[in-house]
Image: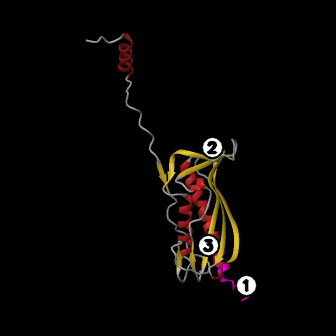
């Protein structure tokens, strides 16, 4: 029969007296966020066209479900990731869905579709350059969105116009949840501006008409 060594006995006594457990500590659950549903009113003239709106392009770090932030006071060019907060889909997918939903409320004919092979009157192609929570201090942050959008006439693939839309909204709390609120509001500001711009551009007669 083997004898228990003094070292093993000491370890067992320490675990029992300290209430320790060999079971790993539970991990913090991941919080999943989305941007909610578009509920903005239809304002301005209707868009008399069928719009094809694919999901926008963007950098690889925006084509995932990770939530990111920057610190302006500590290596601002570095994109960091929240450990316990994620999006339910990539920002590029959610922004594309938001644009389609908003423009659909203003289309009097046809509607707004993703790129599913259906011919349309116009294509709205976007590139998201920034969609991130930016911390200017440990207790101060903002949601920043910058998006370049091109309106292309399907017939002849002619570029009608291209613009860059930006928005910055202070976050109500200096955490991922506050960032979601700020980024949602920033996106809705840009989407409203894009919708108004598209309606105005589509209403203009083609060049040379």
Instruction: Identify the mark at residue 124; answer none if there is no mark.
Output: 3
Please tell me whether mark 3 sits on a helix, a strand or a loop. strand
Tell how many labels: 3
For the residue pair 146 and 53, the one nearer the viewer reads as: 53
The quadrant holding residue 208 is bottom right
Instruction: Identify the mark at residue 207; answer none if there is no mark.
Output: 1
Q: CA distance from mark 2 to mark 1?
A: 51 Å
The correct choice, above or below, for 6 with respect to 166 in the image is: above
**Region in magenta:** 199-209
Q: Are there few (<14), some (14-19), or many (20+) residues within 10 Å of tag 1?
A: few
Please tell me whether mark 1 sits on a helix, a strand or a loop. loop
Image check: 149 left or right of 63?
right
* Residue farthest along the left direction in this orientation: 1
**Residue visible at 65% across and 69% down?**
193
Q: Disc 2 marks which residue?
A: 139
Q: Are marks 1 and 3 in contact (CB under 8 Å)?
A: no
Please tell me whether mark 2 sits on a helix, a strand or a loop. loop
Quadrant where the N terminus is found in the figure:
top left
């Amino acid at each position: 029969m083997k004898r228990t060594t003094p070292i093993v006995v000491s370890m067992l006594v320490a675990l029992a007296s300290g209430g320790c457990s060999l079971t790993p500590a539970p991990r913090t659950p991941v919080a999943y966020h989305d941007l909610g549903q578009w509920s903005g009113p239809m304002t301005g003239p209707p868009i008399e066209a069928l719009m094809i709106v694919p999901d926008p392009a963007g950098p690889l770090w925006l084509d995932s479900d990770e939530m990111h932030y920057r610190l302006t006071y500590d290596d601002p060019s570095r994109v960091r990731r929240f450990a316990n907060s994620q999006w339910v889909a990539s920002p590029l997918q959610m922004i594309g869905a938001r644009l389609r939903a908003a423009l659909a409320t203003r289309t009097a004919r046809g509607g707004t579709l993703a790129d599913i092979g259906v011919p349309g009157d116009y294509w709205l192609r976007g590139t998201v350059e920034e969609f991130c929570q930016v911390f200017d201090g440990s207790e101060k942050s903002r949601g920043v969105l910058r998006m370049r959008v091109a309106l292309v006439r399907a017939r002849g693939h002619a570029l009608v116009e291209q613009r860059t839309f930006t928005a910055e909204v202070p976050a109500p709390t200096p955490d991922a949840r506050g960032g979601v609120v700020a980024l949602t509001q920033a996106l809705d500001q840009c989407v409203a501006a894009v919708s108004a711009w598209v309606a105005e551009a589509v209403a203009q007669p083609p060049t040379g008409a």
